[in-house]
Amino acid sequence: MSESSQSNGKPLIDVEHLKQYFRVRSGVFVNRTVGFVHAVDDVTFTLTEGETLGLVGESGCGKTTLARTIMRLLDPSEGTIRFRGEDISDIGQRKLRPLRKDMQLVFQDPFASLNPRKRVAQIIGGPLKLHGHDDVGPRVRELLERVGLAAEHANRYPHEFSGGQRQRIGIARALALEPRLILLDEPVSALDVSVQAQIINLLDDLQDDFGLTYMFVAHDLSVVRHVSDQIAVMYLGKIVELAPAEELYTKPIMPYTEALLAAIPIPDPKRNRERERIVLEGEPPNPINPPSGCRFHPRCPRATDICKDVEPPLAEYANGHLAACHHPQNVSAEEIKAAGKSPASPLSAGDELPQP
Amino acid sequence: MASLLEVDDLHVSFATEDGLVRAVDGISLSLDPGEIVAVVGESGSGKSVTALTLMGLTRGPNVSFGGSIEYKGEDLLDAADERLRRVRGAEIAMIFQDPMTSLNPVMRVGDQIAEQILAHEHVPKDEAAARAVEMLERVGIPRARDRASNYPHEFSGGMRQRVVIAMALSCDPSVLIADEPSTALDVTIQAQILERLRELRQTENAAIILVTHDLGVVADIADRVLVMYAGRIVEQGTLDEVFYNPQHPYTWGLLGSITRLDIPPPPRLPSISGAPPSLAARPEGCHFRPRCPHEFDKCTEDPPLEPRAGDSKTHCDRCWLSPEDKRARRYVSEDQIGLEAKGAIV
């Protein structure tokens, strides 16, 4: 299989000020544009080879759109995407095709993402044939065994498998072309907890064996903890916090991150009773007309006037911990003083850094 | 005092082309007012069929039942459809899993709630409409008066689930069956919905049966827990008994495979190997046997559900291992939930 490229600190994906807006049209004969959905609004980050970036946020925050834009399944409205140093933000389909095999997707719903009328061998062999491989049989069997299924499963149809097994088939299909990047779009949220753990362990093993880079999209913070090196929290199209995985859990700076953490019930009755419950009221606002300033301010318990008026820049704290908040928490006055504005900040953000 | 809802040795089987599927195989439970009982298990363990049967929603030509369901002393399993229709919605109400598909897309939400009120009570239409608005307010929908004339597609997932809850509560039911009420929702919204259920128990003294596969939710809200596997209860007890002194290896596996944020992450997530058996062809004896790392000779015999853990009469399980053996194979410390000693079953 591919030569194992362990984490060597080289950026695999480099995203700068990426925007993805969708037009909202109105009218039957004339298509007037009446607004834009700001699905991804000025996002900057780097994904290092061999690492995993967890991307977390509520539904509608733009995490799936961001992932799909990076794969160039959608054409970005603005900004650049570099894949191994090469700008792929507006190259044509023909040039994109050879790159496709380096980037693969695993979808959320294992029931909808496999063609029910094709046998497993055809599903997994499909990408291989498209890229000019002839005798795909042995490779398909090898892949099936690698993801924990049996080689004789190749002749079955998707409906003969359980959800967890189907997700394994989806993973085998993504692995077929020996990609460098696998984009996992909520790969376990449709599965039972006991099966979730199996799939996460499998993904972990595959990453070690093949030196894969993952981008793991999830809607809650509990699952991504086990796979991620870095975690980005998105809210209404913007990255509001980006930190090394463990640090995000021990030291959430942005109140939204803390609310997300507090919303996950602790499966330990005694600790659960002791803990103070923060229930975040309301829901994410409409991304067509996002709130001014900090987009989280209408729901934020710490919001003040500045949050309404000025969009906070991403401030860089120790350990490369980025957070966009005027009222950071869990950081000391010295840390706040030492923080500087990160170049990853959205261009529309103000220059006001948080004051101790 | 007799309990509100008493289920005794309930069996539900479906005749299919592949043979008889015993979806529910001898479930007993009792429910008191103001109590929240959680039914947990993997998909296909029969928990949803149990919930639907309590509502009389599984009746059909290919379904056979056994046992009894008594609500306030009246048998519901054999009740006439007409009688069942009076109970359903008014006395026992249900919150379905998927708020996207459980509302009528071409009917205003206010009318949908009013429809249920009108079906059960003789009140003027405008009074029913006013009560629908009041219900929407009670579940925390802002501007309820305007929102009542919206269609379901104009609501987000969390708001739709609130509409479903408002509908379930509209006739002041004494039993509420919630089938995965928060599974389709974001965690932040899930926390809000659980808060509503908690309030409901407090203010209305409603009894709630919560069907879920999320043990985090269970720890958050339940008083008692039933763990189901392949159509049977394999362990039952109070919340603390099941979490801190779990007896069945399947419960250990379930507790172990939750991703937790309050402790440092293990290098590998414990998981239960394999998949639940097909309900049409279950293994002899203990149904968990093929997936269980602690299997021994006696497991080919069927273990009855009885108290095995010591003093508590309410804490029952189906596992042949002796309590001493179980304790040896599991971490037991004061403030830790019970996990298997070797960390993981695979």
Image (spheres, rainbow, N blue to C red):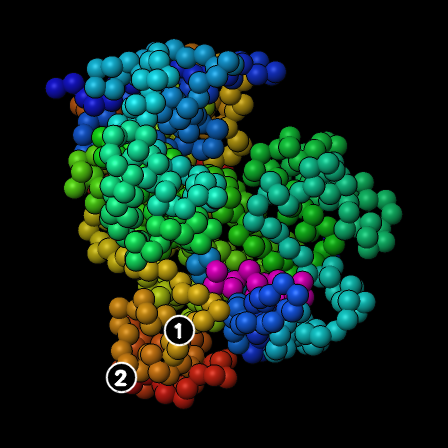
Q: Is residue B3 left or right of residue A51?
A: left
Report whether residue B52 is seen: yes
Mark 1: which secondary structure? loop
Residue at mark 1 shares a chain with residue at mark 2: yes
Amino acid carrying mark 1 in the image: Pro
Classify residue A92 by image quadrant: bottom right
- Give x and y (percent) for residue A303: 28, 74
- Percent across and percent down for residue A350 are 41, 86
Rounded to the nearest whole Å, what is the CA distance between mark 1 and mark 2? 25 Å
Q: What subunit carries mark 2?
A: A
Residue A274, given in percent of the width and then of the height, sits at: 19, 51
Q: Which residue is mark 2?
A: A356
Please tell me whether residue A71 belongs to the stretch shown in magenta: yes
Q: Quarter of the image holding residue A183?
A: bottom right
The amino acid at mark 2 is Pro
Q: In this view of the protein, which residue sits in the foreground, A113 or A249?
A: A113
Q: Report the front residue among A314 and A236.
A: A236
Is residue B97 found inside the magenta-colored segment of the image?
no
Q: Residue at x 49, y 56 (%)?
A: A218
Q: Is residue A159 above or below residue A40?
A: above
Q: Check the residue under mark 1 and report the chain it is in.
A: A
Q: Split into 4 quadrants, where in the image is the C terminus of chain A? A: bottom left
- List the residue tagged with mark 1: A291
Specify the quadrant of the image occupied by residue A341. bottom left
Which numbered marker is on residue A304? none
Residue at the spot x=49%, y=47% of the render? A189
- Segment tinted magenta in the rendering: A60-74
Among numbered discs 1 and 2, the one appearing first in the sequence: 1
